[in-house]
Image: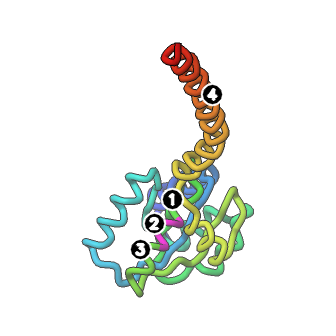
């Protein structure tokens, strides 16, 4: 049986993990077995650059952190090696980066995940991974909004150009 100090530390870790899970808009749980240190370092760097918090977690601590929450259904995959990627803002970043990494490394597998506090299956995470980043989606939407305005501006400019040429042609004829 652990002593009181160790037990207190574990309870604090569970509380911190629960808080991180509640703040995250999306999370992906993976099995990182067989990942080399170099590959793991590169993965962590890419995730960090995209605002994703990634860390290895003990299955028992994660199980305690999700106990009594909507994420409790994730307990069934908590065996073997477990790491979790959490994003507080970008819905697609963690899934996109981890699925790309899983495609390149056969031992690395996505176990499950959650989206807005609800557990989702692996296929949903895979679909999420295929979506473009938030910045690309915003650029696409802005482009769609800007297209009619740009077309209108070109039409007005064509009218101005046409009207501007007509008097000059009449003056040359006189």
Residue 101's label in the rendered image is 3
Mark 1 vs mark 2, CA separation in Å:
6 Å
- Tell me which numbered mark, 3 or 1, is placed earlier along the sequence: 1
Counting residues from the start of the chain, the first of labels 3 and 4 encountered is 3
Residue 88 appears in the figure: no
User: Rounded to the nearest whole Å, what is the CA distance between mark 3 and mark 2?
Assistant: 6 Å
Q: Quadrant of residue 72?
A: bottom right
Circles 4 and 2, Cβ within 8 Å, touching? The answer is no
Q: Mark 3 and mark 4: span between their CA atoms?
A: 54 Å
Nearer the observer, disc 3 or disc 4? 4
Distance Cα–Cα, label 3 vs label 1:
12 Å
Q: Are marks 3 and 4 in contact (CB under 8 Å)?
A: no
Mark toward the start of the polypeptide (1 vs 4): 1
- Depth check: 56 or 14 in front? 56
**What percent of the width, then of the height, locates residue 154?**
59, 34
Q: Are marks 1 and 4 in contact (CB under 8 Å)?
A: no
Residue 159 point in image, percent of width and height: 63, 27
Secondary structure under tag 2 reads: helix
The residue that disc 2 covers is 97
Q: Are marks 1 and 2 in contact (CB under 8 Å)?
A: yes
- Whole-angstrom CA distance, mark 1 to mark 4, is 46 Å
Q: Nearer the viewer, residue 61 or 45?
A: 45
Query: Dot 4 corresponds to which residue?
Result: 159
Q: Which residue is mark 1?
A: 93
Query: Of tags 4 and 2, which is closer to the observer?
Result: 4
Q: Which residues are magenta?
A: 95-99
Q: Are marks 3 and 2 in contact (CB under 8 Å)?
A: yes
Q: Please determine whether, in this image, residue 138 is positioned above or below residue 33.
A: above
Q: Residue furthest bottom?
A: 106
Q: Which of the two discs, 4 and 2, labels the residue nearer the N terminus?
A: 2
């Amino acid at each position: 049986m652990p002593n009181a100090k160790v037990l207190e530390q574990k309870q604090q870790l569970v509380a911190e993990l629960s808080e991180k899970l509640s703040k995250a808009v999306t999370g992906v749980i993976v099995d990182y077995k067989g990942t080399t240190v170099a590959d793991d370092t590169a993965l962590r760097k890419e995730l960090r650059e995209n605002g994703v918090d990634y860390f290895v977690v003990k299955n028992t601590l994660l199980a305690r952190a999700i106990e009594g929450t909507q994420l409790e259904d994730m307990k069934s995959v908590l065996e073997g090696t477990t790491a979790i990627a959490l994003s507080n803002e970008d819905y697609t970043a963690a899934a996109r980066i981890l699925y790309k990494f899983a495609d390149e490394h056969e031992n690395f597998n996505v176990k499950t995940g959650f989206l807005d506090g609800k557990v989702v299956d692996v296929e949903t995470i895979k679909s999420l991974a295929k979506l473009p980043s938030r910045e690309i989606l915003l650029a696409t939407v802005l482009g769609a909004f800007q297209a009619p305005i740009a077309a209108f501006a070109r039409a007005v400019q064509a009218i101005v150009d046409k009207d501007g040429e007509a008097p000059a042609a009449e003056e040359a004829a006189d």
